Structure formats: C-alpha cells, structure tokens
Image (cartoon, rainbow, N blue to C red):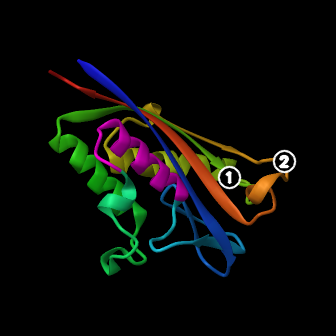
Amino acid sequence: MRFRTGIGFDVHQLKEGLPLWLGGVRIEHTHGLLGHSDADVLIHAICDALLGAAALGDIGQHFPDTDPAYKGIDSKKLLANVCQLLSQKGYSIGNVDAIICAQRPKLMPHIPAMRQTLANVMGIDIDDLSIKATTTEHLGFEGREEGISSYASVLIYKNE
C-alpha cells in the first residue's frame, strides 16, 4: 500500500449581505465569502490538499475562476469531482484534518453538520474527518473580520 499526504489552504474576503457557506453548510451571519464559486474556503482547502496529494495540480487548474461554468457553483460539486479524479487514479482517502480560522461567527455548533455533509460527499467515514475552528485572537485579517481562511491536511493511499 502506498501512502501520500497533501496540504491545502484557501482564503476569501468577507462581504456584507452574501451567504456564508462553510463545509457545505449555510451559516447565518451578516457577512458571507466573496468568490467566483460559493467561496467555501473549507472545501477549497480540502480539494487542494487532495489534489496535491495525488499530484493532480490545484483547484484553480481544474476549476478556473475565469470559467463561467463555475460561477456560483456549490463547492460540494467541486469536491465530488476531485474525489472522482482520485478514484480514477486508484486512490482512496485515509483521513482529512482541517481547520477554519474565523473571528466570527462561532463555528463549533456547525461542525457536526459540516463533518456529516463532507464525509457523505467524499464517501468516507465521519471518523476519518476532523474539522476544527479557531479565532486569531483579533489579529490579522481574520481577526479584523475581513476574511476567513482554512487549512487542510490529508492522507490518501493506493492499494497496489
């Protein structure tokens, strides 16, 4: 069995009046994330980590923000596509560990729904997906509530 790891990162700006999507879950908040798609930073970081682990490039190569087909797209569709690409190369997901950096809103109550939603999309056991949330103690762009970032680390494997 061959193991590979990948890391991913994404960031989007917060704007008043937009919907806030994180981990495939809509969260009530005064601000949402600005982007070409639904701007779900958690899903985008996971996609980049998975693509990187399989040496398949990055999210921008597969789903460019210049392509109108991806305008406003549900990022769960992007993640499902990435998982299909992995499967075509013979890879399975071992586990995903991710963190969201946001001053507000408080995300802890939403994490169980995010885990269930994303585990379903990726076709993995919920125990193979960890999602954490942290503030930056009012430091940096996250602390000033200008944006939200997310990091993800993944382990994939190929049965040989």
Residue type (three-letter) at the residue carrying disc 2? Glu
Residue pushed farthest right? 138
- Horizontally, residue 34 falls left or right of residue 115, namely right
User: For the residues marked 1 and 2, what is the alpha-carbon distance in whole angstroms?
Assistant: 15 Å
Local crowd at mark 2 within 10 Å, few (<14), some, or many (≥20)? few
Q: Number of labelled discs?
A: 2
Mark in the foreground, 1 or 2: 2
- Horizontally, residue 36 falls left or right of residue 99, namely left
Measured as percent of width and height from the top left, residue 93 is found at: 33, 34
Measured as percent of width and height from the top left, residue 28 is found at: 66, 69
Residue type (three-letter) at the residue carrying disc 1? Leu
SS for dot 2: loop
Residue linked to disc 1? 107
Residue pushed farthest top? 1
From this view, report whether residue 83 is shown above or below residue 130: below
Residue linked to disc 2? 137
Q: Specify the quadrant that holds the C terminus.
A: top left
Decide whether residue 27 is among the magenta residues.
no
From this view, report whether residue 2 is shown above or below residue 21: above
Q: Which residues are magenta?
A: 41-57
SS for dot 1: loop
Could you tell which of marks 1 and 2 lies nearer the N-terminus? 1
Q: Residue at x 46, y 55 (%)?
A: 44
Q: Residue at x 37, y 76 (%)?
A: 66
Q: Residue 26 or 43: which is nearer the viewer?
A: 43
Q: Residue 98 or 8: which is nearer the viewer?
A: 8
Measured as percent of width and height from the top left, residue 51 is found at: 34, 45
Q: Residue at x 38, y 35 (%)?
A: 125
Q: Residue at x 35, y 36 (%)?
A: 53
